[in-house]
Image: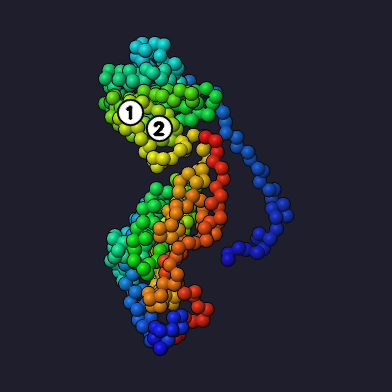
Amino acid sequence: MGLETVFKEGFMTTKVDAVVNWARSNSLMPMPMGLSCCAIEMMAFAGPKYDVARFGSEAMRFSPRQADLMIVAGWVTYKMAHAIRRVWDQMADPKWCIAMGVCASSGGPHRCYGVVQGVDNFLPVDVYVPGCPPRPEAVLHALMDIQENIRNNYSLVNDYEFGEPVKSVAAPESSRIVAPYNV
Amino acid sequence: MSRDATKNAETKTEQGRSPEALKFFFTPVDAPRPVDDRNKNPHAKSTTWVPDVVDALRARFGEDVLGVEEYANEHSVTVRKDRIVEVCRFLKEEQGFTYLADLGGADRFTDEDRFEVIYNLVNIYGGKRIRIKVRVDEDDLVVPPITSVYRAANWHEREAIDMFGIRFEGNPDPRRIYMPEDFEYYPLRKEFPLLGIPGSLPLPAQYPEGPLVLDPFPAAHGSKPVKSYQEPAPEDEDASAH
């Protein structure tokens, strides 16, 4: 009973899980990575009308050390992608990511050389919110999805047993790059 | 749905009406309009019609004014490239065009005189606008900077340096402005592809302390950044019933 059986859920684990996940999901502290126009809708989502405080997420922490949910709102350029990845790496586990808007989900209308076509090219995204910009209610829905994910899929076992540290991901096979054009 | 099954069940010919004739609207190509149509064209703005400034330029610079285009009630003066600083100084100090509204490059994609630098100058108190163009050949990409005349030209020239490769020797800050410093290409040239050269802009790593990724679309090629802890797979049965 308890934590000694690694991936077997004992009675204590699941009960403690339920409580801890309830606490975590109801006090998500978003790190608003508000890069462009979607940031305005994120501010609306935090404002009084589409209040996110009723979900416990009013404490928007701009320091990654204090946040556990990163909301990437707006398009990401290749230059900014490195900064965002650094910020993501500095966030403590467990952490989740919302790609807000079409620009963060897939590049959106900016199909060009400077914009990363989707933040999932370098961040593990949990929820994608379509829209340009998405309504604040859509972002609230995404937040509720994350809450459901935490309650159902997260376990304290993760906090104690990380599994193998991630040293290599299946490297994209397109490290064969098409030869650059003759400029 | 409010679609009426009886009304729309028959085609128009069956209903007795003829199908609408398709109309093709071609963009009409006008004959060039008479240039001074301020009295007839209500949209013509008087700020852009500056024949007196053009005459003053011609009088002062003579051979260096290579051409004047008058279109849509606007004047575009093409000037020889090495005289651009004197032209701008003349316009600023003697004609009162104290405001540089815009400076930009363009790629004409022709064999000779491939690039063009366009200067939009405004005389605020006189209410006049003029456009000065300078043609730059691909083999001789050097243009004198006008930062000594207009300080605002600094960043606009940096944009032309970054996007076209046009060199402004004498610009106090000749760095790239949008793309990273070690970027090897010039994005607004016509042969640069819209989505860029794959591998020219690296993406950050897929996991902490990993290598930079040169592929611009790793997600489309099946690579998925993972979290540093492993999430359990979502269970199929009702997970909340423990």
Foreground pick, B67 / A18: A18
Q: Given the image, what chain letter belongs to the residue carrying mark 2?
A: B
Give the class, few, some or many, for how many residues have Cα within 10 Å of label 2's Cα (few <14, many ≥20): many
Label 2 vs 1, first from the N-terminus = 2
Left or right of residue A20, residue B200 in this image: right
Q: Which numbered disc covers residue B161?
A: 2
B41 or B50, which lies in front? B50
Task: Name which residue type carries label 2.
Answer: Ile
Residue drawn where x is 51% and y is 51% of the image:
B215
* Residue at the (40%, 32%) spot, across then down: B161
Is residue A14 shown above or below A128?
Answer: below
The answer to whether residue B137 is seen in the rendering is yes
Q: Which residue is mark 1?
A: B171
Task: State whether residue B67 is above or below residue B185.
Answer: above
- Label 1 resides on the chain identified as B
Q: Residue at x 47, y 37 (%)?
A: B185
Q: Secondary structure at mark 2?
A: helix
Residue B67: image location, x then y, percent = 45, 17
The residue shown at (52%, 46%) is B198
Residue A47 shows up from this direction: no
Q: Nearer the viewer, residue B24 or B232?
A: B232
Give the residue type that dot 1 points to: Asn
Q: Choose top left, top right, bottom left or bottom right for residue A48.
A: bottom left
User: Which residue is most to the right?
Assistant: B14
Q: Are marks 2 and 1 in contact (CB under 8 Å)?
A: yes
On whether disc 2 and disc 1 are found on a single subunit, the reply is yes
Left or right relative to A172: residue A150: left
Q: CA distance from mark 2 to mark 1?
A: 10 Å
- The image position of residue B175, as x and y in percent, is 36, 35
